[in-house]
Image (spheres, helix red, strand yellow):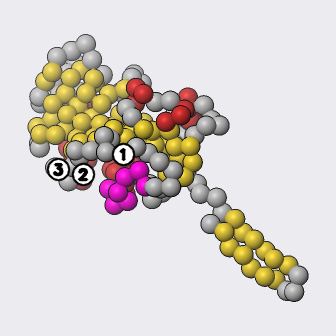
């Protein structure tokens, strides 16, 4: 944003405000992440700068990452990487997950309305949380937070806090999960 103001007869005051990154957006899957495929986006999901001057490993904790698995388009500077309303809904979901004490590091967005949220297990390994937009995000959030809290409190019939491979929230009130080096179960 640039604003200019004339002060008196001989002074021109120019105020320049640079865009601030809100998130990182990477074209492709999490496993494909590389410096030449990632960009900064603002609070509206507007992509404005390619990430070239910063090593990605230095920014893992600084910015939440969106991964775009899209056959229809790729991430480009000067465009929103996702519909602005959908971006706001996803940002609220991610912030609410964080407010519940669950650390999430990234989100894969697919063309078909399905998502993969990457969260940290108790041992800092990654677990994938599958969900989609067939169920309102607030309902998905509620189901996820209750399930997670029960898992952390060992209320799932387990003797220790589980280390998840995945948690699948795409089946209404039924939550399916797989414990690393374990078997698939349903509470």
User: In the rendered view, would you say 76 is above or below 15?
Assistant: above
Q: Which residue is drawn at the image coordinates 61% and 37% (left, top)?
A: 52
Give the residue at mark 2: 137
Q: Where on the picture, by quarter, is residue 121?
A: top left
Q: Are marks 2 and 1 in contact (CB under 8 Å)?
A: no
Q: Residue at x 37, y 52 (%)?
A: 82
Say whether residue 159 is left or right of residue 97. left
For the residues labelled 3 and 1, say whether their Cβ atoms are less than 8 Å apart: no
Instruction: Estimate the x, y position of residue 170 in percent, counting from the top left.
Output: 16, 40
- Nearest-to-viewer mark from 3 and 1: 1
Residue 84 in the magenta stretch? The answer is: yes
Residue 11 in sight from this viewpoint: yes
- Give the side of residue 141 with respect to residue 156, left or right: right
Left or right placement of residue 23 versus residue 16 in this view:
left
Q: Position of residue 147 (x, y in %)?
A: 22, 37
User: What is the spatial separation of the Cα atoms under label 2 and label 3, in whole angstroms?
Assistant: 6 Å
Q: Residue at x 57, y 40 (%)?
A: 51
Task: Specify whether residue 81 is painted magenta.
Answer: yes
Element on which disc 3 rests = loop
Q: Classify the position of the C terminus by image quarter.
A: top left
Which of the 4 quarters of the picture holds residue 57? top right
Secondary element type, mark 2: helix
On residue 135, which mark appears? 3
129 or 79, nearer to the observer: 79
């Amino acid at each position: 944003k640039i604003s200019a103001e004339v002060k008196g007869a001989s002074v021109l005051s120019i105020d320049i405000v640079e865009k601030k990154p809100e998130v990182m957006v990477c074209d492709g899957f999490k496993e494909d992440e590389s410096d030449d495929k990632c960009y900064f986006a603002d609070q509206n999901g507007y992509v404005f700068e390619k990430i070239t001057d910063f090593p990605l490993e230095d920014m893992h904790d600084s910015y939440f990452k969106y991964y775009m698995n899209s056959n229809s388009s790729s991430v480009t500077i000067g465009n929103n990487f996702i519909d602005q309303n959908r971006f706001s809904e996803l940002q609220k979901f991610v912030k609410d997950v964080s407010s519940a004490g669950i650390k999430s590091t990234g989100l894969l967005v697919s063309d078909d309305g399905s998502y993969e949220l990457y969260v940290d297990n108790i041992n800092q390994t990654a677990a994938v949380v599958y969900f989609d937009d067939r169920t309102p995000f607030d309902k998905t959030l509620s189901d996820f937070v209750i399930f997670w809290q029960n898992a952390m409190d060992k209320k799932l019939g387990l003797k220790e806090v589980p280390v998840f491979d995945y948690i699948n929230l795409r089946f209404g009130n039924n939550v399916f999960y797989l414990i690393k080096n374990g078997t698939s179960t349903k509470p």
